[in-house]
Amino acid sequence: MTDKLAPHDRIFCAIDTTDLAHAIDLASNLSGVIGGAKLGKEFFAAHGPQGVREVAKAGLPIFLDVKYHDIPNTVAGAIRAVTPLGLKIVNVHATGGFEMMKRAGEAARETADKAGVDAPWVIAVTVLTSLDQVDLDDVGLAGPISERVVKLAELTQKAGLDGVVCSAQEITAVRAACGPDFKLITPGIRPAWSSSDDQKRIVTPRDAVAMGTDVMVIGRPITKADDPVKAAKRIVDELS
């Protein structure tokens, strides 16, 4: 689906904070500049569903990055609880297995229909971009990262979810395995003019799009910039 997206729609800003006022201010300033805001576990633990509602009032679509990973019934219940918030994206861990993912997707669609909102994309996390091959070996997960990512992506697609979160370095392989309509969400994206922070497997926004990325999650290059709006516009311009 990558060719269908305008440059600004490809970018979701990672607003990783527990400061509600700051999150609202940042989302308000970025509304209309980029495609959405990603709110993570820190924010959700501090402010819950009401905090999400407050940020969403800025007009940016919301990616709720909570990476649910539990027994199928529990994850389905969690998805039912957050779907009425009108999210654009919500995620689970692919390693939760086929049944967990299947139940999550079903819960999102059924609840959205009852609540009168659009169903969110339910996306599965494959391998965190903060991990490299040494990290996987350390926890007993043998084999190349790319093979593990593709296997998890195929399982995600089989379970009926919308796409996966994966490093841009695995985009080509996942696209080949899962086809053009499978949604690919990529964190670990850093413009050439920013530092790599704690993401070990990164590429630039332009490179990521060339590889087939649909949506990119970009955090500190925007949020820690002296002028976040200017930084966001600079990234969009680089994609245009």
Image (cartoon, grey):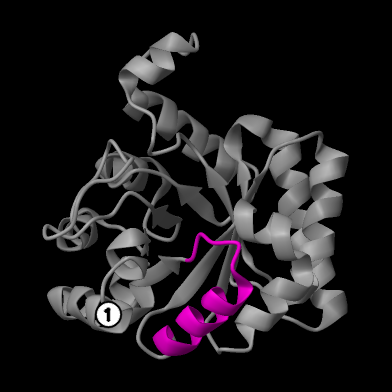
Q: In the rendered picture of this protein, how many numbered marks are placed on residues?
A: 1
Q: Is residue 134 magenta?
A: no
Secondary structure mostly seen in magenta is helix
Is 240 on the left-hand or right-hand side of 135? left
Question: Residue placed at 42% from the left, 78% from the top?
Answer: 35
Q: Position of residue 240 (x, y in %)?
A: 16, 80
Determine if residue 178 is in view: yes
Assign a secondary structure to mark 1: loop
Magenta segment: 15-30
Identity of the residue drawn at 49% across and 37% down: 126
Q: Is residue 23 above or below residue 97?
A: below
In this view of the protein, can residue 97 be seen by the observer? no
* Quadrant in which residue 172 is drawn: top left
**Foreground: 117 or 229?**
229
Location of residue 41 in the rendering, given as x and y in whole percent from the top left corner? 63, 52
- Position of the N terminus by quadrant: bottom left
Which quarter of the picture shows residue 131?
Answer: top left
Front-most of 144 and 192? Answer: 192
Q: At x 79% / y 45%, what residue is drawn? A: 75
Give the residue type that dot 1 points to: Asp
What residue does disc 1 label?
Answer: 227
User: What residue is rendered at 85% in x and 42% in y?
Assistant: 74
Q: Position of residue 108 (x, y in %)?
A: 75, 62
* Depth check, front residue: 238 or 4: 238
Instruction: Residue 119: name its quadrant.
Output: bottom right
Look at the picture and state if 209 lies above or below 142: below
